[in-house]
Image (cartoon, rainbow, N blue to C red):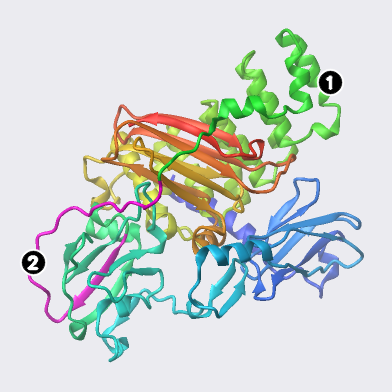
Amino acid sequence: MRNVLTIFIYICLSSVYSQDLDPGEGTPKAVPANLVYGVVYNESGPIQGAIVRIKGTFEETRTAANGMYRIMASKGEVLEIRALGMLIKDTMVDESRKIHIPMKPDGELLETIRILAKKSEKETVNTAFGEKKKAAVGYSTRNTINREEIRSDQLELWQILQKMPGVVVENPGGPNPMYKLRRTMEITIHGTTYPVLVVNGMLFEQNGQQPYVNVQQIKSIKVLNSLNATIKYGQLAAFGAIVIETDQGPERESVEQPQLKRLSGNNYTEIVSTLDEASGKSPKPEYVVRLEKTENFDQAREVYLDMLKDTKHKSVSFFLDTGDYFRKWDTAYANEVVSQIAEIAPTNVKALKSLAYAYEAYGKDELATPIYERIVNLAPSEVQSYLDLARNYKRVGNYQLSATLYKQMVANSIPKVDFNEVGVIVFNEFKQLIALHKSKIDFSDIPNELMKVGFKKDLRLVVEWNDPLADFELQFITPNKKYYPYLHNLYGDQQALQKEIEQGFSIKEFDIEDADRGTWMINIKYSGMRDDINPTLLKYTLYRNYGLPTEERVVKIVKLQDFEEKVTLHTFVY
């Protein structure tokens, strides 16, 4: 089975990579007459991950790392282009098949970000993801520094680490600098989670006083991502490790558990509507109003079939809303209604994710399986495709297929796909599979660290979205009325957004462990564009007792554009 899956993945990847070839200007007979291609760019160069769509349709593509796109479009059709931090642009297709598309930064947005950030350095450069300091551009991407690369003017450890890619230094030059990794920053609700320091093989949690390291004795410093670090050093290194080797290590120290940092001035005083309250206030689409006027299932079905004759109703929103309506009459028919999304948008990944999300919210994971398999075929170079499929296989009982995928993700062995940025998520999900279904999988080649017993999480929150450019904010409110925000937009972590687009994932995990007891609240606010044909959906999954036989799961999906104001997504008791 493992070889079959590997071959399947290879075939998928081969098909997509062949599409990156030049359209073949020298061989016009091999190129379809309505193929349009070119580069999407701004003043800083090509833009990766821009979405190029034929306006008013489900036909769309994303630009590659070199900014290149290819799409089938006829003369007179309009290409709509969206990219992070850029103004939306429409371009009409004319006689020319080669259309290079320049994008302009959203100046108002960038100016707001500049004010909020209070940048101390004035010299900046524009990139596809907004303004960045010149000093932050062009650093080496290597994750190891050797003795000969340490300069004589670098007298303290923080001076070396702040120049390493992906490392952020808190309180540089102070009495107790702290180090964190961008890829695992703020992965819990309470605040930043720090990597461990490994000095000559000895693990130190960052809990205040750091172990003394004589810079002149350093042989090497290596930064390990969360997944590799956990496999090598255990669960304490679940958020990465900074490994330091010296000529002579410090004496053993006793360390306490790290204290979670709190924000200041984050008292929560707002009054926010629930999803149901906000839905009651929002105007309903005319097709929902028509359905609600019917008195029984047969009447509702007749109205629905009549509306299908009108092409304006051939949208993802229409089938999601009507499917929700029919759930009160007949769940099987509701599933049949939403399944039409796969018929009207068979190659649109965003639309297909909406359908899979709906099936999961209905508790019909088995119906989502062929949809996630189709997405792997359509987007074989994107991390999220494999995460979704592995998780779905696990839920429907295909444990060995799920384990095979997780093994490949742990080993980073799927060609042209990099799972390092989602290493903690892969680790947690694989551990959960092993904890609950070890007897049903081949575990002969699974790393020993993953096989340790006792894995569980009190509460695990997973948030996913079907559009990589989704602009939203989550707000976590504790029982003590303190709030902690997560921003998925240019006001948040721009480098993290860039990684998401480059590697193709749209997921965030939050853990609640040993936290404030009582009622927690999750708010959400959407600030993105409205798209009635193919709306942006957010899927929220709450796991209780994750990794235990008593595990429970709650799935909610939200069509974000339906709510103009901040709303409460969920409340739960911890």
The reply, left or right, for residue 574 in relation to residue 202 is right
Q: Position of residue 541 (x, y in %)?
A: 46, 36
Q: Which residues are magenta?
A: 240-266
Which residue corresponds to mark 2?
252
Check the image and name the residue furthest to the bottom. 152
Q: Position of residue 560 (x, y in %)?
A: 62, 39
Q: Position of residue 347 (x, y in %)?
A: 69, 46
Q: Name the kind of residue labelled 1 in the image.
A: Asp
Q: Within 10 angstroms of label 1, few (less than 14), some, or many (20 or more) residues? A: few
Label at residue 400:
none
* Front residue (pair 374, 297): 297
Q: Earlier in the sequence, mark 1 or mark 2?
A: 2
Residue 124's quadrant in the figure? Answer: bottom right
Q: Quadrant of the N terminus?
A: top left
Q: Quadrant of the C terminus?
A: top left
Residue at 28 percent of width and 51 percent of height: 260
Q: Position of residue 238 (x, y in %)?
A: 30, 54
Which residue corresponds to mark 1?
306
Residue at 53 percent of width and 34 percent of height: 272
Query: Is 286 located above or below residue 98 in the figure?
Result: above
Q: Within 10 angstroms of label 2, few (less than 14), some, or many (20 or more) residues? A: few
Q: Name the kind of residue labelled 2 in the image.
A: Arg
Query: Is 33 located above or below residue 534 in the figure?
Result: below
Residue 171's quadrant in the figure? Answer: bottom left
Q: Is residue 412 visible?
A: no
- Please tell me whether the stretch drawn in magenta is mainly helix, strand or loop: loop
